[in-house]
Image (cartoon, rainbow, N blue to C red):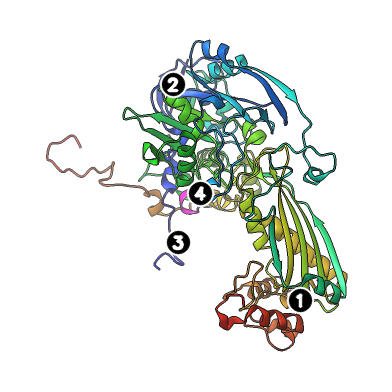
């Protein structure tokens, strides 16, 4: 089975009728999609398939052959968060973190389609995602902040450690860093 | 105090939004085996025969364990505190709830582990289950525990008791007796991360356990007790919990994966399915609470009698602790001088009940607050004024004889009334938490204060 995962073309040996979730987690070691219920009920396994959210736990690998799959690992990284990641971080739209990758991906896809969603649209779009910690108030606030561009530079750069990956500090002249 | 009032970022937030937080299920150790359990299909049954030999011979199966593989099979969650144990890690002669684990398999992959579980032969002798705590004391009820229908170890008593003041006298003096029965039901904690554990046998003879426990050292103690090992042979890695809400205080997977890992000499992971979570992980308990209050027609609470039946499910776990907390809070945020409380931990054939958010207290708060409204309705007085009148005040004694130094009932009720624009009588608007005086120190509380020794005795009963 061939598909593109986070921009890299992959040839997978996971059986075609096994789930996309198992292929990502067990074969590729991409662990942000979670096995929360494995019956499509919680949204923790959500990934983007060609830009749209999908339940990877219910998606047979064969059904996404040739598609482009995106997980939160590809949205941004510590020190260089995507606006949606930064908004969830800054607005406390996270608590235990287990459901967070699914929410972040669903929000990212929604804002691509609907850059200025109403509150009702946000609730509708995220209705399939279960969070047991927050009570959703902060999650909705995070989505609204992301939609409004209300994200601080500090949040976008949160998690940077040591020399910036983008502007490497050269310690030893001539080193590959 | 730099943190107070400041808006601090979550220390784990960047990991959560980038998918880099490593939960137990995300730990990758080469050669890890999958565990699957044979669980009881019956809520109550004898086990007449158990044969795991076919499962053991299935290619890809590395270990099968039953109660015979557990050095110390029966160990109680509160045994370290002197509370006797009643729960086997793996079922021996009988099963007492649907989903109780009987044998657990470790195999190369999930599918092989499931196939092996199907090959385990077990013969049951079904027995009549009990699901309603009220029926546990029926004349024809057949208790299935060695101790009878209820857990009997509360110091010298078979129930959690509180005795304070002269309840019979207060009921004689009362203008009205207000009674009520309250029965909140079970709730599953339902974290989005299911129960999951990973045990890795190390070359030095120790075992590393990746755990989603909410109670790290507690879980270490439980595993060490079952294994009959010293603590220094266990290395626990935890702290990242994908939601718990009390349900991950129980040691659900750590001991069994450790035993399988030692038998197979391979790392073993056990991740429960959502179905297992609902079927057989612990829940918040159902409770049965009966209250009878002796009250005066002008709204003073003279005395409370209360009986609580706590549904432990099939085994005690933390139930006796929950009922004790429950008993301490059975007057709610109010001062009642005369009390008679009896709390029973009753067995049923439901999955064992355990901690959840305010263990033991949410049930009694629910009952007490509805009961306060019922009293106000019966007497035809304002429900908030009834609460303020009987509110805890500085120097008052709680049910378990703790003298209150900073009770919050009065300011909280006043603030709530203010926020919702609720009109209170002038005398109530002026109320503070300061010790009672004048009309707010009526005879029944005056004698109580005198008997309890007053605040000057440093809180110790006279």
Badge 1 and badge 2 in a common chain? yes
Mark-to-mark CA distance, 4 and 3: 19 Å
Q: Residue at x 64, y 31 (%)?
A: B100
The image position of residue B459, as x and y in percent, is 57, 76
**Residue shown at 30%/47% (left/top)?**
A161
What secondary structure predominates along the stretch shown in magenta? loop
Query: Which numbered dot is residue B264?
Result: 2
* Res A33 visible: no
In 3D space, how far apart are the residues under numbered discs 4 and 1 (Cα atoms)?
46 Å
Point out residue B255 in the picture as x, y percentages from the top left corner: 49, 34
Residue B163 versus residue B346 in the image, above or below? below
Q: Which sits in the foreground, B206 or B166?
A: B166
Real-space CA distance between mark 4 and mark 2, rounded to the nearest whole angstrom: 50 Å
Q: Would you say the residues marked 1 and 2 are in contact, meaning their CB atoms lie under 8 Å apart?
A: no
Query: Quadrant of the image for the C terminus of chain B?
Result: bottom right
Label annotation for residue B268: none
Separation of marks 1 and 2 at Cα, in angstroms? 66 Å
Q: Which subunit holds the residue at mark 1?
A: B
Q: Report the mark closest to the observer, 4 or 1.
A: 1
x and y, in percent, of residue B428 in the image: 72, 81
Q: Which residue is mark 4?
A: A146
Q: Is residue A155 left or right of residue B204?
A: right
Q: Earlier in the sequence, mark 2 or mark 3?
A: 3
Residue extent of the magenta highlight = A89-94
Residues at discs 4 and 2 in contact (Cβ within 8 Å) = no
Disc 4 residue crowd, few under 14, some 14–19, many 20+, Cα 10 Å: many
Residues B353 and B184: in front is: B353
């Amino acid at each position: 089975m061939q598909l593109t995962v986070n921009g890299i073309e992959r040839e997978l040996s996971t059986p075609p009728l096994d789930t996309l979730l198992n292929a990502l987690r067990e074969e590729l070691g991409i662990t942000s999609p979670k096995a929360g219920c494995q019956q499509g009920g919680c949204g923790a396994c959500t990934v983007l398939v060609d830009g749209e959210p999908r339940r990877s736990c219910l998606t047979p690998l064969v059904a996404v052959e040739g598609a482009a799959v995106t997980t939160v690992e590809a949205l941004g990284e510590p020190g260089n968060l995507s606006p949606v990641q930064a908004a969830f971080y800054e607005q406390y739209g996270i608590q235990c973190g287990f459901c967070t990758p699914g929410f972040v991906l669903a929000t990212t896809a929604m804002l691509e389609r609907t850059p200025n969603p109403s509150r009702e649209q946000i609730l509708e779009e995220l209705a399939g995602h279960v969070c047991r910690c927050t009570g959703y108030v902060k999650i909705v606030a995070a989505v609204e902040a992301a939609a409004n561009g209300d994200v601080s530079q500090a949040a976008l750069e949160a998690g940077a450690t040591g020399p910036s990956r983008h502007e490497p500090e050269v310690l030893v002249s001539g080193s590959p860093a | 105090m730099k943190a107070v009032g400041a808006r601090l970022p979550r220390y784990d937030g960047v990991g959560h939004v980038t998918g880099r937080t490593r939960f137990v299920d995300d730990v990758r150790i080469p050669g890890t085996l999958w565990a699957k359990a044979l669980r009881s299909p019956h809520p109550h049954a004898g086990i007449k025969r158990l044969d795991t030999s076919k499962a053991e011979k299935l290619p890809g199966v590395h270990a099968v364990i039953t109660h015979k593989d557990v050095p110390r099979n029966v160990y109680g969650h509160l045994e370290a505190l002197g509370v006797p144990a009643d729960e086997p890690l793996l079922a021996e002669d009988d099963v007492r709830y649907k989903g109780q684990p009987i044998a657990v398999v470790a195999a190369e992959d999930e599918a092989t582990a499931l196939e092996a579980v199907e090959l385990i032969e077990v013969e049951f002798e079904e027995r009549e289950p009990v699901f309603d705590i009220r029926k546990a004391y029926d004349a024809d009820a057949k208790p299935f525990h060695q101790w009878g229908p209820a857990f009997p170890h509360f110091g010298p008593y078979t129930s959690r008791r509180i005795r304070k003041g002269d309840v019979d006298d207060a009921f004689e003096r009362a203008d009205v007796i207000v009674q009520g029965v309250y029965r909140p039901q079970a709730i599953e904690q339902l974290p989005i991360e299911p129960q999951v554990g990973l045990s890795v046998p190390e070359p030095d003879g120790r075992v590393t356990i990746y755990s989603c426990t909410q109670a790290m050292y507690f879980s270490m103690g439980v595993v060490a007790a079952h294994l009959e090992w010293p603590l220094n042979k266990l290395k626990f890695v935890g702290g990242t919990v994908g939601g718990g809400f009390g349900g991950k205080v129980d040691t659900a997977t750590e001991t069994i994966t450790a035993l399988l890992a030692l038998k197979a000499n391979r790392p073993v992971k056990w991740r429960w399915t959502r179905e297992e979570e609902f079927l057989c992980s612990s829940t918040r308990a159902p409770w049965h609470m009966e209250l009878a209050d002796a009250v005066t027609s002008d709204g003073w609470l003279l005395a409370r009698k209360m009986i609580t039946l706590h549904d432990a499910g099939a085994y005690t776990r933390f139930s006796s602790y929950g009922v004790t907390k429950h008993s301490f809070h059975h007057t709610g945020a109010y001062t009642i001088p005369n009390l008679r409380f009896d709390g029973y931990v009753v067995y049923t054939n439901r999955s064992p009940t355990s901690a959840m958010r305010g263990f033991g207290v949410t049930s009694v708060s629910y009952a007490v607050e509805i009961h306060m409204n019922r009293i106000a309705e019966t007497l035809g007085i304002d429900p908030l004024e009834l609460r303020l009148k009987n509110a805890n005040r500085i120097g008052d004694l709680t049910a378990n004889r703790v003298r209150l130094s900073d009770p919050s009932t009065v300011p909280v009720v006043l603030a709530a009334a203010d926020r919702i624009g609720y009109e209170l009588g002038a005398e109530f608007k002026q109320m503070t938490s300061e010790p009672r005086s004048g009309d707010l120190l009526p005879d029944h509380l005056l004698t109580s204060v005198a008997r309890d020794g007053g605040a000057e005795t440093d809180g110790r009963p006279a």
